[in-house]
Image (cartoon, grey):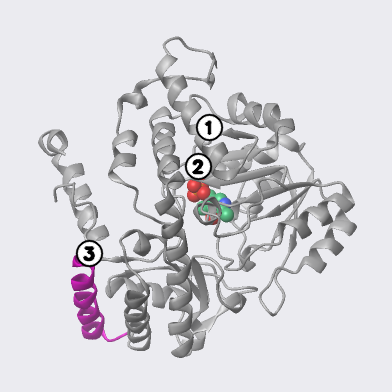
Amino acid sequence: MSYLSTFDPEISEALKAELTRQREGLEMIPSENFVSAAVLEALGSIATNKYAEGVPGKRYYGGCQEIDKIEDLAIARAKQLFGAEHVNVQPLSGAPANLAAYSALLSPGDTILGMDLSHGGHLTHGHPVTFMSHIWQFIRYKTTPDGLIDYDQMAALANEHKPKLILVGYSAYSREIDYARVKEIAQSVGAYTMADIAHIAGLIAAGEMNNPVSHFDLVTTTTHKTLRGPRGGMILCKKEHKKAVDKAVFPGLQGGPHENVIAAKAVAFMEALQPDFKNYARQIKANAKMLEEELRKRDFRLMFGGTDNHLLLIDITAKGTTGAQAEKALDLAGITVNKNAIPDDPRPPLDPSGIRLGTPALTTRGMKEEEMRQIADWIDRAITHNSDEKMLVSIKEEVRSLTQQFPLYTELSS
Ligand SMILES: *Cc1c(COP(=O)(O)O)cnc(C)c1O
């Protein structure tokens, strides 16, 4: 970062401090991860300079020979990784990928059946604060008291409302998804199927969770969560939807694709194709399971009956505190999580009843079951003593000494 520190010390200093923060804390926000140095290099490359509206081989600009190679590689690797017939790697992030996916197959006013947001759905699945909720009509299914997706309710609602699209894939739901059952329900009412695998894409790519790609019409994802690539999105689909999807992304919603990000996606997909990525995904799940067991022992109230993936949703009010208070206490202890609504949460969104935490970033650092046990203990102590600043500071010191045993970005100067 020598050019930056000379020309723009303010940005340079902030980036250095952010690097220290990432190194010295326990990153437990389940949607976050640490990309490799190779991904960073592609991301910061001169590919950012190029306009390449269109798709490889069919661009609106000259000089795209090398860019076409890059984007073709990204597409081929993504197809291989997920067993997809077609992939569009241009969506700028998860939210624009979802918008493009809806607009590829639906007309304004059509009905979408998706998961209730407090039960684990994402804002882009029809929250009233989004513009999408004004374009399409969203109907919602929930989870059962046991914490599993209520497929019977999904079927009943599908029958009643005849949606054009049934949507699965979540941000806070911690269990497996029965895609075959969803497809059957969709077929019975003539609806399209869409899975938003933003959170679990890396686990699916590694064969550690069910893969919806061969059953479903559309699959959207981010590339920066468990897939451990640059911040971005993509859409995977059957050949029959290729034209509609590509048109929806460009010119429907976007302009020039971010080819530096696409280069970084290609690198991340290559990493995910390596045998070692399977070990990574397996360890993410093993770590989440260990955390579940250790937190259960300490009387934490886990939602959805536990976890089959990389994350846990916890009703923290059962510990006499709130989501916002818990997030703050853990932050002071060097553990980053996020406050989160629990199913049918009676509390407001800015101070909900829950916290959500996950293991992808810690696992990238090399942490295993033993560290999870220790972390569960710190979480319990921080929550139990959430107003004892001395205690929180002393946990933070312990956290810092653990993180030093798991160095991050040794190739970058501090
Ligand atoms: C994170 C997420 C998104 C949005 O991704 P952004 O890149 O933040 O726009 C969409 N859907 C689900 C299920 C997500 O978890």
**Badge 3: residue crowd in 10 Å (few <14, some 14–19, many ≥20):** many
- N-term mark: 2 or 3: 3
Disc 1 residue type?
Answer: Ala
Which residue appears at 30% of the width and 61% of the height? Answer: 365
The residue at which mark 1 appears reads as 76
- State yes or no: Cβ of the residue under disc 2 lies below 8 Å from any atom of ligand 1: yes
CA separation in Å, label 2 and label 3: 28 Å
Depicted 73 relative to depicted 134: above or below:
above
Depicted 237 relative to depicted 362: above or below:
above
CA separation in Å, label 2 and label 1: 19 Å
Disc 2 residue type?
Answer: Ser
The residue at which mark 3 appears reads as 24
Quadrant of the snapshot with the N terminus:
top left
**Badge 1: residue crowd in 10 Å (few <14, some 14–19, many ≥20):** some
**Could you say whether the residue bearing mark 3 is in a helix, strand or loop?**
helix
Provide the residue span drawn in magenta: 387-405
- N-term mark: 2 or 1: 1
Tell me if residue 329 can be seen.
no
User: Where residue 67 sits: x, y (%)?
Assistant: 42, 21
The residue at which mark 2 appears reads as 93
**Could you say whether the residue bearing mark 1 is in a helix, strand or loop?**
helix
**In contact (CB < 8 Å): disc 2 and disc 3:** no
- N-term mark: 1 or 3: 3
**In contact (CB < 8 Å): disc 1 and disc 3:** no
